[in-house]
């Protein structure tokens, strides 16, 4: 049952026409109620003229441009403390100083910084020396720095600021290296000598993308800080946080340090992604990536400006010039690595819960879904399946039938995924638990500062933590997985708790007292300490101390797991090294809404296979919410229903007939759109494109799309407008200018760029096709294995001039590197203005045919329809929909459908 064929590629790239338009003016901070007159001129006992003129100098700095000189959390910043740092002290508002308020203590313009003292040309750009004459108040300033400016490509600038006298920690991932200077860069770099500053402009428009002169540069051993002005207030990315898609610049500190905690605003969460995308006046976009894995704060302020504040590593950053949002993301993933092509069933419906207490009860649910004809590709288990929560074990009584369940799933073309946590129990009797005994023998565990395995506490109790930065650990992990796979032939792995999570702070023995554990500055981490609910910062890993490696733990576990699965299954690993679920969200309407921002942000961060727990993880599911969530979830790139223990079941069969039917229809709809979704993942894999796409990516010149996070697109043309509120049968959505078609009926809608109210009864999710698109769909079925073998139905949404185009990527769905090895078909559908649908392909795609084709927006009823010059029967409806059936067109040959 192979759907694969070799086809010559016809790469379609996206080009956008950008025209100039103005954005809304920047928001300024509101004067705080009851705020006092700045007391910059009120005496403090020091009344010499120098101090007075200093006060004046401080007073001229607008509030929005104050760069925080006293970011320490919880500190009560007094004038004395502030002036001891040679900073300006002006109480600014009734809001407290520090996090999320206007700073009271901020740098004066003449605060000492580095000076650029020499500069030489290199093969890729320039290299210069920076010198600081005055030490800062943080220990171990690096007084002499090297700055290297690399014009890597025309759209990618890289800047590295390092300590030339002693190497510092650098993120151990491989990035592309340029050896020659880019020919005609889209950027211009200017340098300010004293104080040192870097200014990056877009060559074509002169727009300033980066200006680090706005605040002093810090480069102490454990405090590195760089600020820049921002070109606009439209900033996206900077995961992982729970927030709107468009970031708030109102003194908003986003802290990065991987943390396992139910998503809350203003909190560091599971992942760390120091990348932002920014829109510019005029609709161009650029990106910025700080390649640094240490704990950090990113401070957004209304100037608009941004500060990177990290406590280790080096300053190594990239500017991506786009110029459209999609190209920015493509350029970013070129550096961090393209998303992998998912195995086909990863795009099906996944069902999971914590608290399937037996394999029999898990099996019952699978059977119930089958009986009701509800599509399901994958059944999962949470930690329930394990014997006493030990990794690589099976509860011998409650889950005795798990291997049979997995066989039954396979017999129904379904798949099985189970959870695995990194913590390995360290307290089993010797000889009783191979993973630990063997791990000790091979020396795979992270060590405490004294060199003993560090012991923390997770589900099974006391555990050691594998060090995935060591290749030896990868082999041990593979051996464990292979041994377990012989017992339970699982198809994929869900790797959880890899922040890494710890129920203790640090370890059973606490942590030593040193500057790694208590750095001079600690970013705004939940719990206040680096060790909070994770390992000691001073723990030792093969490649570096945990202080540097912490936020890379999950990535390294994912790499180890992906390569092990490839070896065991000889197929694409499910999700590993590319997927993400949005954590333990709650079953609330607000969480339904914020999930969209999460999905869009992760698509921007180069991780398109992402979804939130459908129907919410914690709290009791409500029927209406679960219906709406399943409708939205049908459009998550990764669609999994997951539920917490003791909560009532929330799989589709747990609800009444109407709700069940609505959920079933939503999932069948997803399955029918599989060819579109799969093709989008191909473009993500090859070009770094987004799958779930913000509207602004397609309409970058329409500022009204910049903040939209209640709607999104699949690719360039399928607009999803979900209901996000209880008790309504309508939904309001924004339709960018142009012609749109109702996906279901083909009714057209001409928008001038308007908010429109749509009918949305409980069993409907609104879906619209953008003019000019051709979308391949299929008859859905209970699994993707079956439905993806069905003939295609092509839906063409014609532009006003009658044109439309689309594409299809097709392969066997599971071979590793199918694209790289040329084992695929890529087909372009193009309907040009001469009223003919043409398949452009010179290759054989022999297993799949086009059975029917619908054309939305055919203005007049045709007299004849010709398929490859032969008359064909057709229907034409008054809403301008032409449908041609019984086509049986073989995709291995070009075909033409025309009418007159
Ligand atoms: C630039 O070249 C000069 C003269 O060769 C040398 O002294 C200086 O160290 C170089 N600077 C850098 C940053 O390489
Ligand atoms: C960069 O920032 C400095 C300090 O605010 C300012 O004086 C300078 O004009 C800025 N440069 C550009 C090109 O915007
Ligand atoms: C699970 O089902 C099997 C087969 O029906 C039965 O033999 C077994 O006792 C059940 N196990 C549990 C734990 O209920
Ligand atoms: C599973 O076990 C938990 C704890 O023993 C219990 O509260 C829950 O109701 C059980 N779940 C099911 C689906 O039986
Ligand atoms: C799945 O395909 C079978 C065989 O073609 C068909 O009988 C069945 O109705 C389909 N199921 C659904 C849910 O469409
Ligand atoms: C299909 O059309 C394309 C473009 O017109 C052409 O290059 C190709 O040779 C054709 N293939 C076949 C099999 O006729
Ligand atoms: C399509 O055409 C190819 C080559 O002529 C043939 O081998 C294949 O069986 C055809 N496929 C179908 C589904 O008709
Ligand atoms: C549904 C929901 O609230 N999703 C949020 C869950 O948490 C992630 C962070 O892990 C947010 O990004 C999502 O918005």
Image: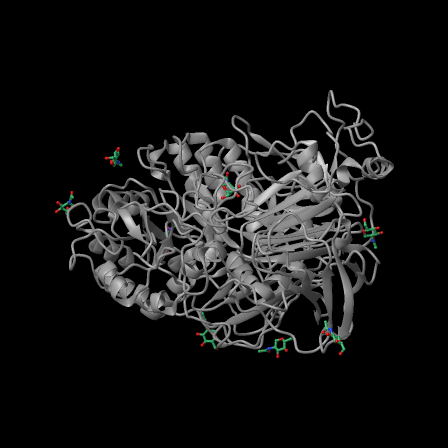
- Location of the N terminus by quadrant is bottom left
Residue 746 shows in this picture: no
Q: Quadrant of residue 318?
A: bottom right
Say which of 409 and 574 sits in front: 574
What is the x, y in percent for residue 261? Answer: 44, 40
Say which of 72 and 332 sits in front: 72
Report the residue at 24% width, 49% height from top: 386
Say which of 8 and 658 sits in front: 8
Report the residue at 43% width, 54% height from top: 538
- Location of the C terminus by quadrant is bottom right
Q: Count up the numbered dots.
A: 0
What is the x, y in percent for residue 723? Answer: 55, 35
Residue 143 shows in this picture: yes
What is the x, y in percent for residue 345? Answer: 40, 58
Report the residue at 38% width, 58% height from top: 786
Report the colour scheme: one colour
Q: Taking 542 as reference, is 682 left or right? A: right
Q: Quadrant of residue 334?
A: bottom right
What is the x, y in percent for residue 404? Answer: 20, 55
Whether 140 is drawn above or below 507: the answer is below
């Amino acid at each position: 049952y192979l759907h694969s064929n070799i086809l010559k590629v016809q790469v379609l790239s996206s080009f956008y026409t950008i025209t100039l338009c103005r954005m809304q003016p920047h928001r300024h901070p509101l004067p705080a109620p009851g705020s006092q007159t700045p007391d910059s001129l009120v005496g403090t006992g020091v009344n010499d003229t120098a101090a007075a003129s200093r006060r004046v100098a401080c007073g001229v700095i607008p509030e929005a441009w104050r760069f925080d000189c006293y970011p320490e959390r919880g500190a009560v910043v007094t004038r004395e403390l502030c002036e001891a740092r040679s900073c300006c002290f002006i109480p600014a508002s009734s809001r407290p100083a520090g996090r999320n308020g206007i700073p009271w203590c901020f740098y004066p313009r003449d605060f000492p910084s580095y000076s650029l003292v020499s500069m030489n040309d290199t093969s890729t750009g320039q290299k210069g020396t920076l010198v600081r004459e005055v030490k800062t108040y943080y220990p171990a300033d690096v007084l002499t720095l090297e700055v290297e400016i690399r014009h890597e490509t025309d759209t990618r600038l890289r800047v590295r600021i390092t300590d030339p006298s002693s190497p510092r920690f650098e993120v151990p991932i491989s990035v592309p290296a340029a050896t020659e200077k880019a020919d005609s860069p889209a950027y211009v770099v200017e340098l300010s000598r004293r104080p040192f500053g870097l200014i990056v402009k877009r060559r074509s428009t002169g727009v300033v993308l980066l200006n680090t002169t706005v605040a002093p540069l810090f480069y102490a051993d454990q405090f590195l800080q760089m600020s820049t002005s921002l070109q606009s207030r439209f900033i996206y990315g900077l995961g992982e946080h729970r927030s709107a898609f468009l970031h708030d610049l109102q003194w908003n500190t986003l802290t990065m340090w991987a943390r396992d905690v139910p998503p809350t605003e203003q909190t560091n969460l599971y992942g760390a992604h120091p990348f932002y995308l920014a829109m510019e006046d005029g609709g161009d976009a650029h990106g910025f990536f700080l390649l640094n894995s240490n704990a950090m704060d990113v401070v957004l302020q209304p100037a608009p400006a941004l500060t990177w504040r990290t406590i280790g590593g080096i300053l190594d950053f990239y500017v991506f010039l786009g110029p459209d949002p999609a190209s920015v993301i493509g350029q970013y993933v070129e550096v961090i690595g393209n998303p992998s092509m998912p195995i086909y069933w990863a795009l099906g419906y996944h069902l999971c819960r914590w608290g399937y207490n037996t394999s029999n009860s898990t099996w019952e649910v699978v059977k119930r879904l089958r009986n009701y004809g509800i599509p399901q590709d994958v059944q999962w288990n949470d930690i329930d399946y394990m014997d006493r929560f030990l990794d690589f074990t099976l509860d011998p009584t409650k889950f005795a039938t798990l291997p049979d369940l997995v066989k039954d799933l396979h017999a129904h073309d379904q798949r099985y995924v189970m959870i695995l946590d990194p913590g390995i129990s360290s307290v089993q009797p010797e000889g009783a638990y191979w993973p630990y005994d063997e791990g000790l023998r091979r020396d795979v565990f992270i060590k405490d500062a004294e060199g003993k395995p560090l012991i923390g506490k997770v589900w099974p109790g006391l555990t050691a933590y594998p060090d995935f930065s060591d290749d030896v650990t990868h082999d041990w992990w593979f051996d464990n997985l292979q041994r377990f796979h012989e017992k339970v032939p699982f198809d994929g792995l869900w790797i959880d708790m890899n922040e890494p999570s710890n129920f203790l702070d640090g370890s059973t023995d606490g942590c030593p007292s040193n500057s790694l554990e208590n750095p001079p500055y600690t970013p705004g981490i939940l719990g206040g300490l680096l060790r909070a609910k994770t390992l000691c910062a001073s723990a030792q890993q093969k490649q570096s101390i945990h202080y540097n490696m912490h936020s890379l733990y999950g990535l390294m576990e994912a790499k180890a797991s992906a390569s092990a699965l490839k070896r065991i299954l000889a197929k694409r690993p499910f999700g590993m090294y590319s997927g993400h679920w949005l954590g333990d969200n709650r079953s609330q309407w607000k969480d339904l809404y914020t999930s969209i921002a999460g999905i869009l942000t992760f698509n921007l961060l180069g991780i398109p296979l992402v979804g939130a727990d459908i129907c919410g993880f914690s709290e009791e599911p409500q029927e209406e919410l679960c219906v709406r969530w399943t409708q939205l979830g049908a459009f998550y790139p990764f669609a999994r229903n997951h539920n917490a223990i003791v909560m009532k079941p929330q799989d589709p069969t747990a609800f009444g007939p109407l709700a069940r039917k609505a959920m079933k229809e939503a999932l069948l709809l997803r399955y029918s759109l599989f060819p579109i979704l799969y093709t989008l993942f191909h473009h993500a894999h090859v070009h770094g494109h987004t799958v779930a796409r913000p509207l602004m990516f397609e309409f970058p010149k329409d500022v009204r799309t910049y903040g939209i996070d209640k709607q999104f697109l699949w690719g360039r043309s399928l607009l999803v407008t979900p209901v996000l509120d209880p008790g309504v049968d309508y939904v309001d959505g924004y339709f960018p200018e142009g012609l749109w078609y109702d996906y279901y009926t083909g009714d057209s809608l001409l928008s001038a760029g308007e908010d429109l109210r749509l009918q949305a009864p409980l069993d409907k999710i609104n879906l619209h096709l953008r003019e000019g698109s051709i979308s391949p769909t299929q008859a859905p079925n209970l699994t993707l294995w079956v439905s993806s073998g069905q003939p295609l139905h092509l839906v063409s949404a014609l532009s006003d001039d009658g044109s439309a185009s689309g594409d299809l990527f097709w392969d066997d769905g599971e071979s590793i590197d199918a694209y790289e090895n040329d084992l695929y078909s890529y087909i372009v559908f193009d309907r040009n203005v001469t009223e003919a649908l043409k398949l452009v392909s010179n290759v054989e795609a022999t297993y799949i045919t086009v059975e029917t084709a619908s054309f939305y927006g055919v203005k007049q009823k045709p007299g004849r329809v010709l398929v490859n010059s032969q008359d064909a029967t057709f229907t034409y409806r008054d809403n301008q929909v032409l449908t041609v059936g019984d086509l049986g067109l073989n995709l291995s040959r070009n075909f033409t459908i025309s009418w007159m």
